[in-house]
Structures are given as structure tokens and as C-alpha cells.
Amino acid sequence: MVNEGTKAPAIKLETDAGEKFDLAAHKGQNVVVYFYPKADTPGCTTEACEFRDAWAAENFAKYDAIVVGVSPDQPKALTKFKEKFHLNFPLLADPEHTVAEAYGAWGEKSMYGKKYMGILRSTFIVGKDGKVAKVFPKVTPKGHAEEVLAALAELQ
């Protein structure tokens, strides 16, 4: 996993809207990058909706921060997820999991005794200087948006 204080790995991915997102274009802004396993699943929906509600309340704007969600889903699946839950921030498609691997958010998981590779639910705050300011490994979806907002407040 990427360490705090190191330069954030590049992110150049397609969004749910078919646009290109480039992390470098957001230097001078705090960027919350959260990795989630699969669109429209219970935990991922909880996490996304909490970020949506915090964004709608302009809580992230106070800290000059934007939020982006990254998953291995295809853009079409991300569009459906975004529309279904009225998400108000970009979702990024990483089907080859190259960005997830660069951040250390791709690794071995286990379910019912079966091991497989997948997204390790985690979040990174990339500071205005382009360095990783905060790492949240092993995220629990419920309450995570508040955790991130608290960390942004501490970074001010």
C-alpha cells in the first residue's frame, strides 16, 4: 500500500460519463480517492451514498476537496450505479486494476475459504501538493465518509 508522504501514483482513467479523469489536473486541491470492489453491492452502495450525502452538504468543499470512487467495473456499470443512487461525484473505471495495483488496493482476498484477487477497500487523501496525506486501509463502509472528513479537518 502507498505510504503517507509519498508522491501519489498517477491516475488517468475513464469516468462514468465517458470523460478522462487525470489526477495531475487537480493539483492544488485535496482529492479523496476511494477504492471499492463492485458497483451496486450493499457495502459499496452504503459507502457511495455516505460520500454523496456529505458532498451534497458541501462538507468536502470546506476543505477544497473532491471525491472520486475507483472500481474494476466497466464505465457502463458505473453509469447505472451513479444514476440509480444519484451519486454526485465521478466514478472511475479501472478494469485492468492498474491504478488499484499502484496504490496497493489490489490484493488477495478470501471468502468462504476461497482465495481470490480483488479490490482491497481502501481510501487515500491526496493533498494539494500531490502527495498522499492520509491512508485508510481496510475501510468499513458505514461511517467512512465522516472519518475522511475528520482527517481532512486535521490536515488544514
Image (spheres, rainbow, N blue to C red):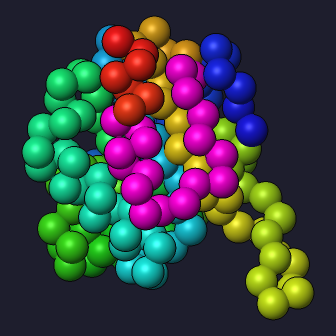
Q: Residue furthest bottom?
A: 112
97 horizontally vs 59: left or right? right
- Span highlighted in magenta in the image: 132-149
Q: Quadrant of residue 8?
A: top right
Q: Is-magenta flag for residue 146?
A: yes
The picture places residue 85, in percent across and down from the top left corner, at 21, 73
Residue at 42 percent of width and 16 percent of height = 155
The picture places residue 26, in percent across and down from the top left corner, at 33, 23
Q: Does the rendering let one see residue 94?
A: no
Against 110, residue 106 (above or below) is above
Front one among 20 and 34: 34
Q: Quadrant of residue 25?
A: top left
Question: The C terminus is located in which quarter?
Answer: top left
Residue at 39 percent of width and 79 percent of height = 40
The picture places residue 75, in percent across and down from the top left corner, at 38, 66
38 horizontally vs 82: left or right? right
Residue at 79 percent of width and 70 percent of height = 109
Against 91, residue 118 (above or below) is below
Q: Is-magenta flag for residue 6?
A: no
20 horizontally vs 43: left or right? left
Question: The N terminus is located in which quarter?
Answer: top right
139 horizontally vs 114: left or right? left
Q: Does the rendering let one see residue 5?
A: yes
